[in-house]
Structure formats: C-alpha cells, structure tokens
Image (cartoon, rainbow, N blue to C red):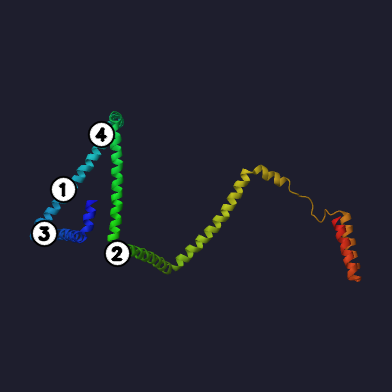
C-alpha cells in the first residue's frame, strides 16, 4: 500500500528509475556479447577446441545418463519383486505420513483452539486487506494512467480488428488461389450433407421399425387389400348416379329454376 502511494506521488522518478534499470541491463548484455566475440576473435584456435570439448562433455553426460537409465531398468527387471515391495512401502509410508500430519494439525487446533480461531480470523482479515489493497492500487493506477489505459485498449481493439481482417484476406486469397479445389470441396460437402441426411432418416425409420415391430405388423395386417374401389360400388349407388345424370341432362333443357330444384333434390338424395 505504501509502495503504491509512493509510486503515485513520485511517478516521474519511478518511470526514470525503471528506464535506467532497463538501459543498464541492455548495456550489460551488450558488453557481455562484445566480450565473448572479442575473446573468440583473439583466441580463435582455442575457441573451437573449447567448443568441441564442451560438446564432448555434454554428449558424454547424456550417454552416462542413458546408460544409467538402462542399468536401472535392468535392475528393476532382475529384482522386480523387491522393486514392487519398495514401491508399495513408499506409497504406504507417504500415506501414513500424510495421515500423521493431518492428525497432528487437528490435535494442535483442538489443544490451542483459541489461538487457532484468532489465527484464522487474522488470516482472513489479512487476505481481505490484500485484496482491497490490490483493488485500490488498480483503481489509482487506472486514474493516474488514464490516457495510457485508453491508448492500450484502443491498440488492443485495433490489433484484434487487424488480425481478423488479415485472417479474412488470407482465407479469401487461399480460396482464389485454389478455386477449383474449393469448388470441389464445397460440392463434396453438400453431397455428403444430403447423403448424410437421407442415411439418417433411413436409419431412424429402421430403428423405429425394429423398436415397434409388433405395431408395424398390426398396421400392415390391418390395411385394406381387397379389390378396387370402383368394383366395390353397390348396384343401388350406380343406379342413383345414372338417374342423377339423367335428371341433370333434363334440367339442362329447362330453366334455371328447374336446374336449381334438381340440384337441391340431388343434394338431398346424396346427403340421405
């Protein structure tokens, strides 16, 4: 908290100190690189020998590490029963140690419960104070560095927009460069989607038929399979149809009133 207030009061000095530290680190790194380059130029014969010796040492260490792993694996295969017992003992020892630590902490809380309650309360208050301090520091930093915050937000938004546009342009350029492949791919995707939809419908109908095969059999057996509807018309209906057609022809020779009467009579007969 005090550091944040000091930083806000002396923001110019803090920025200058940070810039000076960064410049000093960069100069130190540059001096080290120049020293290494100058020593390599002055001792150009010894430098390759030293580099070769370092490479040989590294390779030798890697080989020793590999041979050590192979030796451990061979020992484990040779004494696998003892290795299993050792691993079981290690796991049991770790579990017992964990249980003992838990019991010791619980016993300490029980013996010194007043101190434990006070410590827990203080720890919670300290955590809350740290959280409030961080929140206050962030608020003050945003207020003091308001212009920089707005500039950073604007730059982030512009960067996202630029990345999105570049991705869209790259996608369009790939589409134009591989136009035939893109058209073929689109056609294949459309055909696959249509086939997939038809196959899905067929599979769903098959599953419904398998799950409800008894109902399907009943529906199939109960469907009418007799002669055609024209052959099943009774003679009385045929006679009534013939008479109605004759009356309609007769009504055509009489006036509209007769046609209307005949039409009403035919409607009443049909309803009966």
**Helix, strand or loop under label 4:** helix
- Which comes sooner in the sequence, label 2 or label 4? 4
**Helix, strand or loop under label 1:** helix
Distance in Å between CA atoms under marks 2 and 4: 67 Å
**Residue at mark 4:** 75
Distance in Å between CA atoms under marks 2 and 1: 55 Å
Which residue is at 29% across, 63% downward?
148
**Helix, strand or loop under label 3:** helix
Distance in Å between CA atoms under marks 2 and 3: 42 Å
Distance in Å between CA atoms under marks 3 and 4: 49 Å
In the image, is 2 to the left or to the right of 162?
left
- Which comes sooner in the sequence, label 3 or label 4? 3
**Residue at mark 3:** 35
- Which comes sooner in the sequence, label 2 or label 3? 3
Marks 3/1 in contact by CB < 8 Å: the verdict is no
The residue carrying pointer 1 sits among few (fewer than 14), some (14 to 19) or many (20 or more) residues within 10 Å by Cα, namely few
**Residue at mark 2:** 147
In the image, is 221 to the left or to the right of 246?
left
Say which mark, if any, is on residue 57.
1
**Helix, strand or loop under label 2:** helix
Is 179 rendered above or below residue 17?
below
- Residue 271 coordinates in the image, percent (x, y): 85, 56
The image quadrant where one finds the C terminus is bottom right
Q: Is residue 89 visible?
A: no
Mark 2 or 1: the one toward you: 2
Distance in Å between CA atoms under marks 1 and 4: 26 Å
């Amino acid at each position: 908290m005090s550091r944040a207030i000091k930083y806000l009061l002396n923001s110019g000095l803090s920025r200058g100190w940070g810039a000076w530290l960064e410049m000093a680190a960069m100069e130190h790194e540059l001096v080290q690189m120049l020293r290494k380059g100058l020593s390599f130029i002055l001792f150009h014969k010894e430098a390759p020998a030293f580099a070769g010796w370092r490479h040989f040492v590294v390779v030798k260490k890697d080989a020793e590490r590999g041979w050590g792993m192979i030796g451990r694996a061979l020992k484990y295969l040779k004494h696998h029963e003892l290795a299993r017992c050792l691993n079981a003992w290690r796991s049991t020892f770790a579990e017992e140690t964990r249980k003992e630590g838990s019991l010791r902490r619980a016993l300490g809380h029980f013996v010194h419960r007043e101190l434990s309650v006070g410590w827990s309360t203080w720890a919670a208050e300290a955590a809350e104070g740290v959280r409030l301090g961080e929140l206050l520091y962030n608020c003050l930093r945003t207020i003091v560095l308001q212009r920089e915050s707005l500039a950073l937000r604007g730059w982030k938004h512009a960067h996202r927009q630029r990345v999105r546009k570049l991705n869209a342009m790259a996608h369009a350029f790939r589409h134009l460069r591989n136009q035939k492949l893109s058209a073929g791919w689109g056609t294949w995707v459309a055909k696959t989607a249509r086939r997939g939809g038809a196959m899905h419908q067929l599979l769903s109908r098959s599953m419904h038929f398998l799950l409800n095969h008894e109902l399907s059999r009943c529906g199939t057996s109960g469907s009418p399979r007799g002669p055609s509807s024209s052959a099943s018309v009774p003679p009385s209906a045929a006679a009534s149809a013939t008479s109605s057609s004759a009356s309609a022809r007769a009504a055509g020779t009489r006036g509209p009133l007769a046609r209307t009467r005949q039409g009403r009579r035919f409607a009443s007969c049909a309803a009966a």
